[in-house]
Amino acid sequence: MKTLPLSSILLLYALPTHGVEVFVHMMPWFETKETNNGTWGQHWTMANRNPDNIVDGVPEIASFYHPEIGPYASSDPDVIDWQMGIMKAAGISGIFLDWPGTTDAFDYPKNKENAEAIIEGTKRNGLKFAVVYEDNNLNLASVPDKIAQGVADMEYLKSNYFAEDNYYRVKDAPLLLDFGPQALHDNEWDQVLEPLEPGTTFVSLWNQGQQAGNFVEGEFAWVWADYVDSLIVWYANRNVSVKIGVTYPGFHAFYGEGGWPGPMFYIEYGVETFTRTWEMALNNTEIIQICTWNDYGEGTVIEPTLEYGTQFVDIIQQSTGSQYTPEDFEELTNIYFMKKKHVDNPSMLDRLRRQHHAIVRRFD
Ligand SMILES: *[C@@H]1O[C@H](CO)[C@@H](O)[C@H](O)[C@H]1NC(C)=O
Ligand SMILES: *[C@@H]1O[C@H](CO)[C@@H](O)[C@H](O)[C@H]1NC(C)=O
Ligand SMILES: *[C@@H]1O[C@H](CO)[C@@H](O)[C@H](O)[C@H]1NC(C)=O
């Protein structure tokens, strides 16, 4: 399979998605020197890398894969428009946004600010969004009263995000995903979600719904060490009302090299893994979460990279029956680079923004 040219892979996997909604899991945690007080953000460096060094012709980041547009700041509207333009042209419905909560610790406040810049981007580009709450942050930040902080986080979501027109709703309520449970369990979730009810469709990680209290309505699958084994069982047997499938290109984490703790299992990265998990998800679920758009550290990226170009988004574009073409990816990327080239030319920037807008709204 690996030796087939991309075009034959596209033919093989050009399955119609018939109404399936495709979302990408997005990380809001990248910083450049410009946005981070003169030092590259930790998700580009981990413990020991420096993007200012050019190694084998590419910036030395804590990843085996390199963004096509170079290491970026998650809050940069030009970056966000590029990312969302590519998503739009691929036929992706929107993002499931990794969300740190409102705890004031580590880089969480910056990640939350970035998340909000990204949410603005979803509105500009005609995409939907939903939040993936990182309840483990309550552990990592040693929050003394986890329930009170959880309640504050949920109230924040309710007042600030859930009422947005483009917040993604399932079963008539805003979808809320939790990347766990990891910090809150069982009736702690009931206390935390109480202020939202009725009014959210709450889902946990796969096979963990029984730890997520009474309000939980479903689960989402994720990448795991045994590759498709658990996934086959979960798709076939797990009986939950909202079931969100997963697709990923592999798992090739940089933690070992980068000197950070983290899972070190390996799943071969490339179109073969992607198409297998994509086809399984299409066969089994109506909502698919792609894991991930841009987790460079864990090596699950489908965003265009120097190494893989648009291979993953090409497959999605074919499969979703998007009316866009691969040339649109190219044009969106050219517009991004032109914006960076003409940062000091407001009339040029204005023209480029209008060009971008015309592309992403072409079929709305
Ligand atoms: C930014 O860097 C300056 C000089 O290194 C330092 O004095 C300041 O406290 C830093 N600010 C933040 C928000 O980290
Ligand atoms: C799935 O769960 C629902 C609700 O608990 C139940 O009515 C249904 O029979 C179950 N289906 C299977 C295949 O177990
Ligand atoms: C998806 O379903 C089709 C039709 O039932 C089947 O031929 C194919 O093997 C399935 N693909 C995967 C990856 O399970």
Image (cartoon, helix red, strand yellow):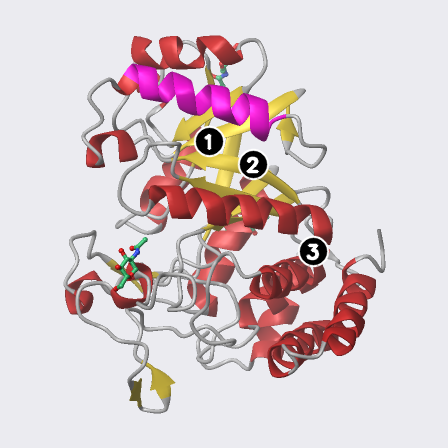
The residue sitting at the bottom extreme is 57
Can residue 242 be seen here? The reply is: no
Report x, y in % for residue 244.
51, 35
Residue displayed at 64% across by 28% down: 169
Report x, y in % for residue 102.
39, 32
Residue receiving disc 3? 91
Q: Are marks 1 and 3 in contact (CB under 8 Å)?
A: no
Number of numbered discs: 3
Sequence-wise, the earlier of marks 1 and 3 is: 3
Residue receiving disc 1? 177
- Identify which residue, 86 or 160, lies in the foreground: 160
SS at mark 2 in the image: strand
Q: Main secondary structure of the magenta part?
A: helix
Residue receiving disc 2? 130
Report x, y in % for residue 360.
76, 60
Q: For mark 2, does the 10 Å Cα neighbourhood hold few (<14), some (14 to 19), or many (20 or more) residues?
A: many
- On screen, residue 364 above or below 235: below
Q: For mark 1, does the 10 Å Cα neighbourhood hold few (<14), some (14 to 19), or many (20 or more) residues?
A: many
Residue type, numbered disc 3: Gly
Is residue 72 toward the left or the right of residue 128 in the image?
Answer: left
**Of circles 3 and 2, which is in front?**
2
State the CA–CA distance, disc 3 to disc 2: 17 Å
Asked if residue 192 lies in the magenta stretch, the reply is: no
Is residue 3 toward the left or the right of residue 189 in the image?
Answer: right
Give the magenta range.
Answer: 147-162
- On screen, residue 22 above or below 196: below
**Of circles 1 and 3, which is in front?**
1
SS at mark 3 in the image: loop
Residue displayed at 72% across by 51% down: 124
Q: Are marks 2 and 1 in contact (CB under 8 Å)?
A: yes
Residue 348 position by quadrant: bottom right
Sequence-wise, the earlier of marks 3 and 2 is: 3
